[in-house]
Amino acid sequence: MKKYLFTIALSGVLLGSAFLIYDRLNSGPEYKADLAYSSFIKQVKAGQIERVEISGKVVKFRTSSGEDFETYNPGDPNLIDDLLATGAQIRTTAPEERSLLRELFISWFPMIILIAICTFFMLKMQKNGPGAGNLAFQKNKAKVFHEDQIKITFADVAGCEEAKEDVVELVDFLKAPHKFQKLGGKIPRGVLMIGPPGTGKTLIARAVAGEAKVKFFSISGSDFVEMYVGVGASRVRDLFAQAKENSPCIIFIDEIDAVGRKRSNSGMGAGNEEREQTLNQLLVEMDGFEDNEGIIVIAATNRSDVLDDALLRPGRFDRQVNVGLPDVRGREQILKVHLQKVPTAENVEISYIARGTPGFSGAELANLVNEAALLAARSDLPEVSMRHLEKAKDKILMGVEKHTMVMSEDDKRLTAYHEAGHCIVGRLMPDHDPVYKVSIMPRGRALGITMFLPENDQYSASKRKLEGQIASLFGGRLAELLIFGDDRVTTGASNDIERATELARKMVTRWGLSNKLGPLTYGEETGQAIFGHPGAQGNAVSSNVAQMIDEEIRSVIDRNYYRAEKILQENMAILHLMADALMKWETIDRWQIDDLMTGKEPRPPMEYTEMKNRISPESTGHDKDNGISLQPGESFA
């Protein structure tokens, strides 16, 4: 943009200077009169003029006293008559004539300047490269990274070893293609990286370029599409033409679903047509008549389900690499990479943090380390300790504490019993995730929070565990009801009821966990036709089956509601004790909860330096593994 603004400003200066020169050439020589014309006329009428010589607009005259003067003739029509009346001698000369060449130059000078400026811009656009067309907006917007600009290697990528293995052979091909060609092997033309946001898809692509030492073209899918029809296709052509000139190289298209969505016959406007033209050109460039030898296309998306089938076939994106969320070992490797960049205390246990963050992506782990560094800097400390990492994790999982939010004592006590109800039921239900923290400190939109955290990475859930979650969700409402009576029950359990109902409905209609209805999927049409594709269809149900579904959902809810009520009635003393502890400390951890569940007064909150010494495999109940993470089992008031 700066370059174009400078060019426009320079053109304006040159054009203005040219017109000034033209005006100077077109005007006569600058003339300064010796005597005012009015004084000259007075002398003429007084008969004081002896001789006059008129040459164009210049009047030279001699007075009766013998003095010579010049003045400017404004074109007075009575001047000759006045001079003849006084008997002055009059002499005239023909005006100087310009040469034909000069006249032609003056006439064509503005046109010559305009032609020169237009020629300059045309040459500038042609210099931008083939395929760019005659307009700058038709050029691709890819950022080009040269071999020495990419410092990232596979050593900087952690937590996704399987994905790295899938792309290592791309590096081998770019470094030594003859090793594959002599056996007739062909390297994949395209690699599609699929995974949730923040898992390192872009990082892997840059590491491939850094390892292979080739040029790297980076562009987003939305950069192809503009309001002008045909611009997207032109940019695709220009990108591949530029890549061919720099082969071998890598083209990385981020968020390819912006241009790679499924095509349809609905014809919903020019915008949809423009996107399809861009997709068609991309399909041709990736696998058309022309060979793109040495060009590897790497694309990333978290919406592979919406991509066009022609884009996913072998010959275009031959290989799909799943970059999923890291497991505990991957999280530990990622944390090591990020913690190397900050000074850390000796008490930092990376493995403990890794076990406590299942479900975290690489980007979230990087954010956790950054938040911990900010907390340490805010306290003017020279290094990041375990306490800062734990506080940063709580901030990410539960939200920022609202210290300025004022709650009355009655509201705090009601919230304390509500969260204590969640905690006790969840702690005593079989197969339930262990309780990590309970707090009545407002965070985000919640007045209180009970966090249940899984022991390990989990990939499925049993029926017993799901029913335990439903029971624990009703623990808060039941605690309010048992302690304060029916007229003091609040709306704080609205989210709990919604989530419990949703779990029960999925158990009956989607997961086949109902003995009465069996392992069938029940449902209705869940979507409308979009872009020519019908909505998702479920099995249509009759009114009798719909009534059976409602009765079975009610049965699941009632069964676990009464289970939770029975647990709280049998542990009423623990409920009072835990509510008092929450009123005193506002937040209690799992070690304080251990004390409360045995009927003892809870210990004061431990510093995390002490916490490390208390971790042992012999922890009772659900604390045998100290993994910590936010899962669907947490409960908000």
Image: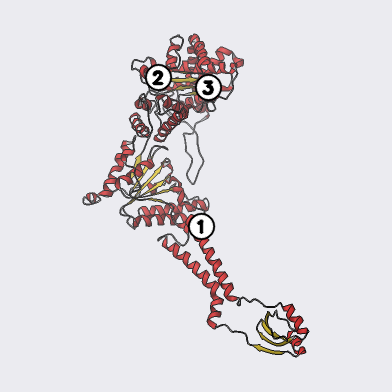
Q: Position of residue 305 (x, y in %)?
A: 42, 41
Q: Quadrant of residue 20?
A: bottom right
Taking depth in this image into account, of 283 and 548 the one nearest to the observer is 283
* Residue 532, placed above or below residue 88: above
Callout 3 amino acid: Met
- Residue 431: assigned label: 2
Real-space CA distance between mark 2 and mark 3, rounded to the nearest whole angstrom: 28 Å
Callout 1 amino acid: Leu
Taking depth in this image into account, of 187 and 139 the one nearest to the observer is 139
* Residue 274, placed above or below residue 447: below
- Residue 441: assigned label: 3
Badge 2 crowding class, 10 Å Cα cut-off, few under 14, some 14 to 19, many 20 or more, is some
Sequence-wise first label, 2 or 3:
2
Q: Position of residue 49 (x, y in %)?
A: 73, 86
Q: Quadrant of residue 392?
A: top left
Q: Position of residue 288 (x, y in %)?
A: 35, 56
